[in-house]
Image (cartoon, rainbow, N blue to C red):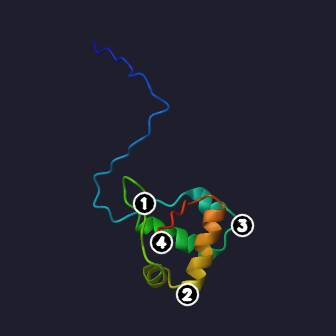
């Protein structure tokens, strides 16, 4: 007989998800794809930021040149798209002075 005793769940604790695969993938929230307020450029920039995000901290630090290269958008469009996805609270931008 196997006795199963469930562990208490701490709903306030952050969830850490680990994946043992090779890392050739990244997450893009479905809600971003479904948001009609965002342009296709905004979604590509969000996906590019997700591509460069750290798996544990979700921090992403690509330069505008790198964003332009990987998204195939202009530097100006990358700038506008970051402003828009920040405006809709999909990302948080910390500017370093």
Look at the picture and state if 33 lies above or below 18: below
Residue 67 point in image, percent of width and height: 47, 78
Tell me the CA gap for discs 2 and 3.
20 Å
2 or 3: mark nearer the eye? 2
| Residue 16 lies in quadrant | top left
Which of pointers 2 and 3 lies earlier in the amino acid sequence?
3
Query: Would you name the residue on which mark 2 appears?
Result: 74
Left or right: residue 37 versus residue 47 is right
Query: Would you name the residue on which mark 1 appears?
Result: 59
Residue 61 point in image, percent of width and height: 42, 69
Between residue 34 and residue 12, name the one nearer to us: 12
Look at the picture and state if 74 lies above or below 80: below
Which of pointers 2 and 4 lies earlier in the amino acid sequence?
4
Which residue is depicted at the point 61% across and 57% down?
A: 31
- Image quarter of the N terminus: top left
Between residue 46 and residue 84, name the one nearer to us: 84
Query: Would you name the residue on which mark 3 appears?
Result: 37
CB atoms of marks 2 and 1 within 8 Å:
no
Secondary structure of the residue carrying tag 2 is loop
CB atoms of marks 4 and 1 within 8 Å:
no
């Amino acid at each position: 007989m196997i006795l199963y005793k469930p562990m208490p769940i701490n709903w306030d604790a952050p969830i850490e998800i680990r994946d043992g695969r090779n890392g050739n993938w990244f997450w893009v929230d479905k809600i971003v794809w479904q948001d009609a307020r965002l342009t296709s450029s905004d979604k590509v920039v969000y996906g590019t930021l997700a591509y460069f995000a750290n798996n544990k901290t979700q921090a992403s630090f690509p330069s505008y040149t790198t964003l332009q290269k990987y998204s195939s958008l202009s530097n100006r469009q990358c700038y506008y798209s970051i402003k828009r996805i920040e405006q809709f609270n999909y990302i948080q931008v910390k500017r370093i002075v």
